[in-house]
Image: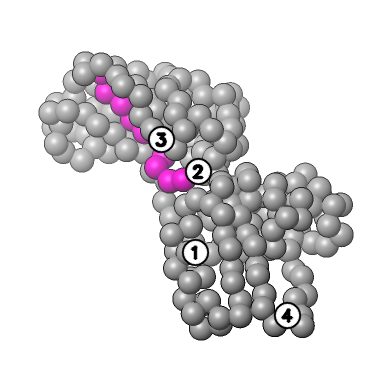
Amino acid sequence: MKRLALSVSLVLCLAVLVGAQNLAINAAGATFPYPIYSKWFDVYHSKNPNIQINYQSIGSGGGIRQLTAGTVDFGASDMPMNDDQIKEFQSKNGCGVLHFPTVIGAVVPTYNVPKVSADLKFTEKAISGIYLGTITKWNDPEIVKANPGISLPKDDIVVVHRSDGSGTTFIWTDFLSKASSDWKGKVGSGTSINWPVGLGGKAMRESRVSSSRRRIRSDMSN
């Protein structure tokens, strides 16, 4: 089964469910789609009272692990399973696995530069340079060039990123790998990586930082 390059995938092992008067379907995975899943499953249950779908929002990696272990009927993941994961699933379960998109969302950087009210623009070179640690000041020429007429301070940029394994991190680092050959060669993409710079926090809970410094966040979901 070839991988599909989709931001949000629902990983489903086909199974035949027959002869059940009351049916419970168990699932787990990404936190990002949980709100709409919860709504969908509630509406579905109201129309089909004999079918209950139980979804645990434990993260993309957890969804893949539980699906592979056979403890859930389907899993949700922000990143597709890789070839090794698919082979492991097939070996343990004796059947194939399908990926298909269910929810589409965006992963974007956010920033906070006090006294700058204009919307800033960032080139791919600027974004990748910030996360590589080669661009460290808000008034770096690459950022200034993309924002003519805006007075940018010389303050340090403090990067904040996820420290835990995250499908969102995969999406963001996959973008950086496409935007920068340096990033692809030195860091690469994945749910957990060795970030070149920055402060790590689970689910983007920001650490305190002095008022003289500025921050940029890599992602928001999960």
Which dot, 1 or 4, sits closer to the camera?
4
Asked where in the image residue 76 lies, by quadrant, the reply is: bottom right
Q: CA distance from mark 1 to mark 4?
A: 23 Å
Q: Position of residue 140 (x, y in %)?
A: 29, 21
Does the residue at mark 4 contact the one at mark 3 (Cβ under 8 Å)? no
Q: In this orientation, does residue 56 appear?
A: yes
- Describe the colour scheme in one phrase: one colour
Residue 219 included in the magenta stretch of the image: yes
What is the three-letter code of the residue carrying label 2? Answer: Thr
Residue 100 included in the magenta stretch of the image: no
What is the three-letter code of the residue carrying label 1? Answer: Tyr
Res. 20 mark: 4
Q: Earlier in the sequence, mark 2 or mark 4?
A: 4
Classify mark 3: helix, strand or loop: helix
What is the three-letter code of the residue carrying label 4? Answer: Ala
Q: Earlier in the sequence, mark 4 or mark 3?
A: 4
Estimate how packed mark 4 is, as few (under 14), some (14 to 19) or many (20 or more) residues with alpha carbons within 10 Å. few
Asked where in the image residue 207 lies, by quadrant, the reply is: top left
Range of magenta residues = 213-222
Pointer 2 residue: 168
Pointer 1 residue: 37
Q: Main secondary structure of the magenta part?
A: loop
In terms of depth relative to the viewer, which is nearer, 18 or 176? 18
What is the three-letter code of the residue carrying label 3? Answer: Met
Res. 204 mark: 3
In this picture, is 193 found above or below 42?
A: above
Estimate how packed mark 1 is, as few (under 14), some (14 to 19) or many (20 or more) residues with alpha carbons within 10 Å. some
